Image (cartoon, helix red, strand yellow):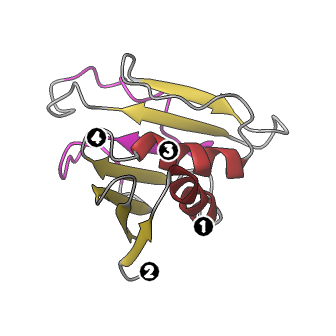
Amino acid sequence: MPTRIVETSEAAETEELGAELAGLLRPGDLVLVRGDLGAGKTTFVRGAARALGVRSPVTSPTFSIGHLYRTHPPERFDVAHLDLYRLSGLAGEEPDLLADYLGAERIAFVEWPPQDDPELPAPRLVVTIHHADGDARRIEVQG
């Protein structure tokens, strides 16, 4: 997929893009989500998670390493939502730090991924969200 650039003017449109891109994902996929504070990373993940079948509230895992959500029906797969903001990289961390969140039985979204960290598997998509005027966002999707 060549780089795709989408401009959104409100949070609902950012969620809609997440929902649209969720249709490209399969269990085992990793999506890296980059952007400044308040850019809309969790909003994007919320839209994708809902489209994948998550019914519970999707919130930022800023104060934990991540959240794991069940999709409905439960026998489908899990959606992992991680926030690595507090980590400078994964090399010095416990080897199993992300074991509960990454794997063939789940789709994982990682906010604040370390740049080019060999500890993370190759991503299916890389989403970068930039602030524009007001609630507007410029979203780049690479896959």
Q: Looking at this rendering, what residue extends furthest in the front direction?
A: 134
Residue at image position (27%, 43%) is 113
Q: Residues within 10 Å of mark 4 (few under 14, many from 20)?
A: many
Does residue 2 show up magenta in the picture? no
The residue mark sitting in front, 4 or 3, is 3
Q: Which residue is mark 3?
A: 43
Estimate the x, y position of residue 97 in percent, counting from the top left: 35, 23
Q: Nearer the viewer, mark 1 or mark 3?
A: 3
**Residue toward you, 136 or 19:** 136
Q: Pointers 2 and 4 in contact (CB under 8 A)?
A: no
Q: Amino acid at mark 4?
A: Trp
Residue picked out by circle 2 = 1
> Residue beneath label 1, please?
24
Q: Earlier in the sequence, mark 4 or mark 3?
A: 3
Kindly report the distance in space between the C-alpha atoms of the residues bearing marks 2 and 1. Answer: 11 Å
Q: Of circles 3 and 2, which is in front?
A: 3
In the image as oriented, which residue stretches furthest toward the bottom?
2
Classify the position of the C terminus by image quarter.
bottom left
- CA gap, disc 4 and disc 1: 21 Å
Q: Secondary structure at mark 4?
A: loop
* Apparent side of residue 74 relative to residue 126 in the rendered image (left or right): right
Select label 4 or label 1 by which is in front. Answer: 4
Q: Measure the C-alpha gap from mark 2 to mark 4.
A: 22 Å
